[in-house]
Amino acid sequence: MTLKEYRDNLLNKKFSAVEFISEIFQDIEENKQINAFLTLNKENALKKAKEIDEKIGRGEEISILEGAPYSVKDNILVKGCRTTAGSKILSDYFATYNATVIEKLNAKGAIMLGKTNLDEFAMGSSTENSAFGPTKNPLNLNFVPGGSSGGSAAAVAKGWGIFSLGSDTGGSIRQPASFCGVFGLKPTYGRVSRWGLIAMASSLDQIGPLGKTTDDIALILEIISGKDELDATTVKKDFCWEGQFNKKDFIRNIKIGLPKEYFQEGLDLRIKHKIWEIVTKLENLGAKVVDISLPLTSFALAIYYIIMPAEVSSNLARYDGVKYGYYYQNQTSDIIDYYAKTRDKGFGPEVKRRLLIGTFVLSAGYAEKFYLKAQKVRKALVGDFKEAFSKVDLILTPTSPTLAFEIGERTQDPLSMYLADIYTVSANLVGIPALSIPIGKIEKLPVGLQLMASWWEEEKMLKLSKIIESLN
């Protein structure tokens, strides 16, 4: 159900908000094995739903978001709600304030159902790294939902809320959206405030929506975007989504680039075939499709796994067991030993792995060899994309080189897990918007197509997404 359909049904009294949201909570209870939620906001959600029903009962109008149920990835702060980031080290942490995006959704009357599962501190591509157990793909419980926003993607795919908020550092919204057959948007870096997002890698993190339709995620983006005095990286750029446009004129004036580096060895040929089916349909509608090259793409994953762990090492230094969260309870007079034991018990293996890598690449004698060189290549990668966008309007690629993989299939091989992000990390490194669009299924598992646009060009990308959506 879309946001508009939900509101229309409420106004026409096909069901009440209390009935609808009660059914969601009941379904979550009956399908606990999916493990999409870490914390439910049941009492407060039903209270707000009752208020919306009373408002409708008085004959008052409601906005498109009033009463709309949604979920939130558990690394986004919601005041008074347990916020764990999927980690034991924050297992008893309750947020003392709302993230800016939550304040904006609250102001529009949306109803939060609960906090969704994720890879610990958003570090992972399968939601198997959570300290609270893996999330399962609702389309097939033997498969992963993707990560790190796997709980959010699973919740939307299962119908547990109309949309969800996730975070994307290297593909953590788009890849699970692809694996679960929903839409997932990473906005331009600076479009949406990160105030209240538990930091993983500050120059890469971005909050974005997951939903069932282009219109829904565009409307959510319109609400959560904008300049925020609490986040110095945000930019004053208005985004307004009308949804209605001349599709024939738009498609005839759009030029789409297909980067050859994204269609080489390693891509499942069945996914490649699905992508070409869409490309052919777009060409038949009048779109201009051209081959392009992004030559530094082959280095993107390598530089991502240098820059990201370096920022992780800095951001996670605050979790010492002194101010909040888990702490080592046995007596020790050595403060360094206390810190070490707290972090050893509180952090999971993947977080430790990235902390070690990040500390190493920032250490004396290695920072210039690894970290500074990676930043130089990152700058060159920005040049690659600027060159590409001087020739085309949008870039079209697969979201993931593979379909969703089985739970446990890659947990013993971190490198194979990291390769799941090979098509998504570039957008984070250069800060451009990117979107995963569901385009069908192979062996009952969803396939995602990725669009990338130039900086601040979300509207152009979403318009093409709406056309692609109509082709499925």
Image (cartoon, rainbow, N blue to C red):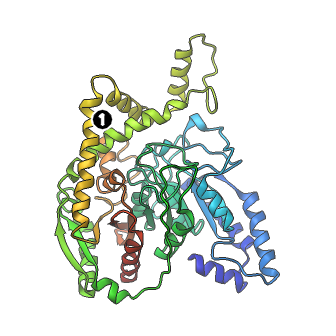
Q: Is residue 155 visible?
A: no
Along the line of sight, the residue nearer the viewer: 423 or 136: 423
Q: Position of residue 205 (x, y in %)?
A: 45, 49
Query: Image quadrant of residue 410?
Result: top left
- 220 lies left or right of 353: right
Along the line of sight, the residue nearer the viewer: 406 or 224: 224
What kind of residue is marked 1? Tyr
Number of marks present in the image shown? 1
- For the N terminus, the image quarter is bottom right
- 41 lies left or right of 33: right
Taking the view exactly as shown, the residue that stands out farthest to the top is: 333
Q: Is residue 306 visible?
A: yes
Name above or below for residue 2 compared with residue 354.
Answer: below
Q: Residues within 10 Å of mark 1 (few under 14, many from 20)?
A: many
Q: Position of residue 366 (x, y in %)?
A: 28, 27
Q: Position of residue 352 (x, y in %)?
A: 43, 32
Identify which residue is drawn at 22% across, 47% down.
299
Identify which residue is drawn at 60% across, 60% down.
71
Identify which residue is drawn at 42% across, 73% down.
459
Along the line of sight, the residue nearer the viewer: 237 or 303: 237
- 460 lies left or right of 97: left
Disc 1 element: helix
Query: Image quadrant of residue 59?
Result: bottom right
Name above or below for residue 448 compared with residue 412.
Answer: below
Identify which residue is drawn at 73% across, 84% down.
13
- 296 lies left or right of 223: left
Q: Which residue is mark 1?
A: 371
Q: Position of residue 65 (x, y in %)?
A: 63, 72
- For the C terminus, the image quarter is bottom left
